[in-house]
Image (tube, rainbow, N blue to C red):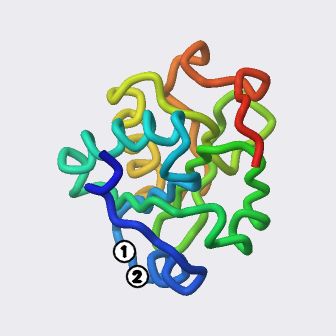
């Protein structure tokens, strides 16, 4: 179902999305279209994008077409999801050492919706890091991920 979500295929397009998305959470899913975990995540993202349209804009980014960002965000597992608000990288404390991105797929649509709401509310109050509302047992651990880039 990933064809429902817009794709960014170059550094320039990613730069433009980061600069031009205002007053909404920008969601960048880094991965590959044919990866099974990416497809699972894309399904959740596409099913929630309409409900979240007032709060978030979601893009799919191919790791092979944007090596600058893949390296910058240290994306070694896919999918990895990065969040921005008004051009500012939003960090989330998932209870793991890495606050810069969410690695893996969300377990449920509600987990993703809750996370976007928390990031949105935090960003509107000027916060650059928020506490994840997702139950820690629903957050994938790195050793469960098998897809190396």
- Kindly indicate whether the residue at mark 1 contacts the one at mark 2 (C-beta within 8 angstroms): yes
Please report the residue visible at 39 percent of the width from the left and 74 percent of the height from the top: 21
Residue 91 rendering spot, x and y as whole percentages: 63, 51
In space, the residues marked 2 and 1 are separated at their CA atoms by 6 Å
Q: Residue furthest front?
A: 34
Quarter holding the N terminus?
top left
Residue 6 rendering spot, x and y as whole percentages: 34, 65
What is the total number of numbered labels drawn onto the structure image? 2
Q: Residue furthest left?
A: 50
- Label 2 or label 1, whichever lies nearer to me, is 2
- Label 2 crowd bin: few (<14), some (14–19), many (20+), radius 10 Å: few
Please report the residue visible at 38 percent of the width from the left and 24 percent of the height from the top: 108
Q: Which residue is mark 2?
A: 20
Q: Which residue is mark 1?
A: 22
Residue 13 rendering spot, x and y as whole percentages: 49, 81
Q: Which mark is residue 14?
A: none
User: Does residue 135 lie above or below 23 as drawn?
Assistant: above
The one of 1 and 107 positioned closer to us in this rendering: 1
The one of 39 and 141 positioned closer to us in this rendering: 39
């Amino acid at each position: 179902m990933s064809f429902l979500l817009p794709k960014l295929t170059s550094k320039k397009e990613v730069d433009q999305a980061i600069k031009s998305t205002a007053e909404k959470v920008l969601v960048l899913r880094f991965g590959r279209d044919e990866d099974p975990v990416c497809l699972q995540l894309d399904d959740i993202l596409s099913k929630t994008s309409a409900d979240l349209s007032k709060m978030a804009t979601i893009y799919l980014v191919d790791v092979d077409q944007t090596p600058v960002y893949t390296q910058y965000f240290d994306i070694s597992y896919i999918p990895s999801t990065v969040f921005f608000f008004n051009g500012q990288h939003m960090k989330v404390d998932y209870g793991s050492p890495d606050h810069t991105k969410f690695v893996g797929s969300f377990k449920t649509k509600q987990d993703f919706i809750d996370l976007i709401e928390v990031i949105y509310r935090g960003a509107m109050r000027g916060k650059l890091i928020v506490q994840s509302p997702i139950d820690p047992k629903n957050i994938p651990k790195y050793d469960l991920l098998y897809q190396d880039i």
